[in-house]
């Protein structure tokens, strides 16, 4: 009897200590700078979004949020770096439909499992995708674009931020849906691909409005079509796919922030709450709206809803990747 009392007392004390430690840990979190890993080179849409979010999140959390660019292999170098970080809430990863959902099928020997080795914090923004082309590209709207591609497939190239990236997936979707096989040219980041479109070295790319809006408005690239049912306010003069003979050729890129597995639930909760507050600041909303970035569904801004999105998107893209027979280059 006495031994049982001792055992139960020890268990109670142990639980109390752990709860106290957990409370103290969360109360002190964060007490130093945080790192947000961007799995692409600087200048691309993921990097631009990460810097806007990190600036706002820094103000909410009272600590610097440092953006760390870790490009390579379609985002998997950055993913590997993040998966090996301590699960303490101080290292985060930003990813999208390409780097998270597509890579889960595309790369057969990844050192991490995106569904097991990460905890989604929140979906942070849905970016419409636009076909942007060199300034002298002759087509306007999706119908003309489709006709031009079919007549000139062999001599055209599209740019992408590596196999598995959102830009690569967009280019492949165009090929599949329009029945063409335009060659893809892969770069270490979308920013480099954009530069070559502006210079006329490649013909077009499917990119996020996050970066495309300013280049289209300045005339550095030509906005051919927004892959949405309707035109967007940020680019009212660019036709939508919904106005064409391909009204269901639609493509958005969702973006998400995750942390490594093992991050304590209370830290996940605090980070989520801070991130949601950061996404609501007037400065961030104004910058997102100017870039055409839409607010995710409320449920997707919770850890549970973000995970549901990630699981469903991995399943959604798997058949297409397998049908393409795509392999990392």
Image: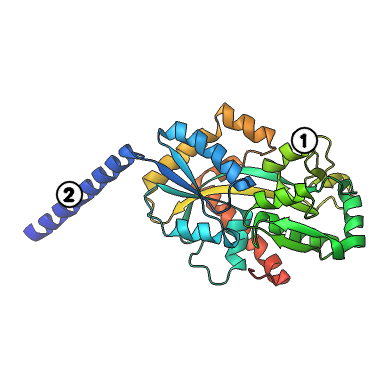
Q: Nearer the viewer, residue 305 or 156?
A: 156
Disc 2 packing (10 Å; few <14; some 14–19; many ≥20): few
Residue 253's place in the image compared with 314, above or below, is above
90 with respect to 211 (left or right):
left
Q: Residue at x 42, y 56 (%)?
A: 261
Residue 231 occupies quadrant: top right
The percent coordinates of residue 97 (x first, y second) are: 63, 54
Which residue sits furthest left?
Answer: 2
The percent coordinates of residue 29 (x first, y second) are: 35, 40
21 with respect to 258 (left or right):
left
Q: Residue at x 63, y 68 (%)?
A: 328
Q: Nearer the viewer, residue 78 or 196?
A: 196
The percent coordinates of residue 300 (x first, y second) are: 57, 45
Quadrant including the N terminus: bottom left
The numbered mark at residue 239 is none
Q: Is residue 168 visible?
A: yes
Residue 74 occupies quadrant: bottom right
Disc 1 packing (10 Å; few <14; some 14–19; many ≥20): some
Quadrant including the C terminus: bottom right
Mark-to-mark CA distance, 1 and 2: 64 Å
Disc 2: which residue: 13
Disc 1: which residue: 217
Element type at mark 1: helix
The percent coordinates of residue 277 (x first, y second) are: 50, 33
Q: Residue at x 65, y 63 (%)?
A: 163
219 with respect to 144 (left or right):
left
Residue 230 occupies quadrant: top right
Colouring of the image = rainbow
Element type at mark 2: helix
Q: Report the label total.
A: 2
Q: Earlier in the sequence, mark 1 or mark 2?
A: 2
């Amino acid at each position: 009897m006495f031994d049982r009392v001792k055992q139960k007392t020890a268990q109670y004390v142990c639980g109390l200590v752990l709860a106290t430690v957990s409370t103290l840990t969360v109360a002190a979190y964060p007490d130093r700078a945080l790192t947000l890993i961007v799995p692409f080179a600087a200048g691309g849409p993921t990097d631009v979004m990460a810097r806007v979010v990190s600036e706002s999140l820094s103000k909410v959390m009272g600590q610097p949020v440092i953006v760390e660019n870790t490009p390579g292999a379609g985002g998997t170098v950055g993913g590997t770096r993040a998966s090996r970080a301590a699960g303490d809430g101080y290292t985060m990863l930003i990813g999208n439909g390409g780097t998270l959902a597509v890579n889960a099928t595309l790369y057969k020997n990844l050192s991490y499992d995106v569904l097991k080795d990460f905890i989604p914090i929140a979906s942070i923004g849905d970016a419409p995708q636009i076909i942007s082309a060199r300034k002298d590209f002759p087509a306007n709207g999706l119908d003309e674009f489709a006709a031009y591609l079919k007549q000139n497939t062999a001599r055209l190239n599209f740019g992408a931020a590596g196999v598995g990236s959102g830009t690569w997936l967009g280019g492949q979707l165009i090929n599949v849906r329009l029945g063409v096989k335009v060659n893809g040219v892969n770069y270490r980041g979308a920013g480099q691909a954009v530069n070559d479109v502006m210079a006329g070295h490649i013909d077009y790319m499917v990119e996020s409005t996050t970066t495309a809006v300013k280049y289209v408005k300045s005339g550095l690239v030509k906005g051919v079509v927004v892959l949405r049912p309707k035109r967007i306010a940020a680019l009212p003069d660019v036709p939508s796919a919904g106005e064409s003979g391909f009204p269901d050729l639609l493509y958005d890129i969702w973006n998400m922030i995750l942390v490594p597995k093992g991050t304590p639930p209370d830290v996940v909760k605090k980070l989520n709450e801070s991130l949601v507050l950061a996404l609501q600041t007037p400065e961030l909303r104004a910058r997102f709206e100017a870039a055409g970035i839409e607010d995710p569904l409320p449920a997707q801004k919770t850890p549970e809803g973000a995970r549901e999105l990630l699981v469903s998107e991995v399943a959604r893209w798997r058949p297409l990747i397998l049908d393409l027979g795509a392999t990392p280059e």
